[in-house]
Image (cartoon, rainbow, N blue to C red):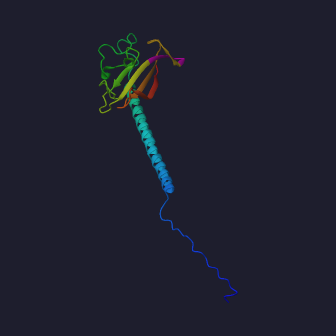
């Protein structure tokens, strides 16, 4: 039997058992995990910025509407002097002294500003200064507009229609200058 049957002897194989990862596999896994961590951090920062913006936008809208509510039932012009005097009269120095819409328009064309920095605001619909609103301001402009073309401003006292614009700004602790967050505009009919 031995003669007919050739028995081949197999050479022993060099069998290597892998234990652990190679350096390249480890580096690749580190890059993949690191990219995932960076993406999560970036997403969280974007969410924080978006959340901050939406919070500021809703606060600004509220502050603009506070001025609207404050001025809602005021006459367009002073009950005593009428249109003869535009802006606040000399005795009207605080928001609670304002007795007509044109009092809210500043004398210098810059509008009347109610701000935490000046200690005059922002103000509520009752004319009270909001506390703990550092960085916020309300800038109010009152303009005469053409009754046939409401986008066109005319000279003070030249129309019975008034447009009131409130620009709400915020200056955070790291901001160089205030930035406009929202505008609220309405027309006070004659």
Please tell me whether the stretch drawn in magenta is mainly helix, strand or loop: strand
Tell me if residue 166 is in the magenta stretch. Answer: no
**53 is higher (above) or lower (below) than 149:** below
Residue 63 image position (x, y, % from top left): 38, 30
Front-lying residue, 161 or 165: 165
Name the image quarter holding residue 46: top left
Residue 147 sits inside the magenta stretch: yes
The x and y percentages for residue 61 are: 42, 32
> For the view shown, which residue lies furthest in the right direction?
4
Where does the magenta region start and end? 143-149
Quarter occupied by residue 3: bottom right
Give the left or right position of residue 115, taking residue 31 as reference: left
User: Which of the image's four quarters has the N terminus?
Assistant: bottom right
Q: How many marks?
A: 0
Between residues 86 and 29, which one lies in front from this camera angle?
29
Q: Residue furthest top?
A: 84
Front in this rendered view, residue 63 or 148 = 63
User: What residue is drawn where x is 49% and y is 54%?
Assistant: 29
**Could you tell me which residue is drawn at 46 percent across and 25 percent down?**
186
- Asked if 86 appears above or below 136 in the picture, the reply is above
Image location (x, y in percent) of residue 38: 46, 46
Please identify the residue farthest to the front as the structure is shown: 3
Residue 171 % position (x, y): 37, 29
């Amino acid at each position: 039997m031995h003669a007919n049957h050739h028995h081949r002897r197999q050479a022993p194989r060099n069998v290597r058992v892998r234990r652990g990862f190679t350096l390249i596999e480890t580096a690749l896994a580190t890059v993949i995990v690191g990219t995932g961590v960076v993406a999560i951090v970036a997403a969280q920062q974007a969410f924080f910025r978006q959340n901050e913006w939406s919070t500021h936008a809703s606060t600004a809208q509220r502050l603009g509407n506070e001025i609207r509510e404050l001025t809602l039932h005021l006459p367009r012009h002073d009950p005593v002097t009428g249109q003869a005097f535009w802006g606040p009269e000399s005795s009207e120095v605080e928001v609670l002294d304002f007795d007509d819409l044109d009092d809210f328009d500043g004398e210098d064309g810059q509008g009347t500003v109610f701000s935490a920095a000046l200690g005059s605001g922002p103000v509520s619909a009752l004319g009270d200064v909001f506390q703990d609103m550092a960085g916020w301001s309300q800038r109010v402009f009152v303009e005469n507009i053409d009754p046939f073309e409401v986008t066109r401003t005319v000279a003070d006292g030249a129309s019975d229609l008034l447009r009131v614009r409130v620009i709400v700004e915020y200056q955070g602790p790291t901001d160089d200058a205030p930035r406009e967050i929202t505008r609220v505009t309405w027309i006070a009919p004659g």
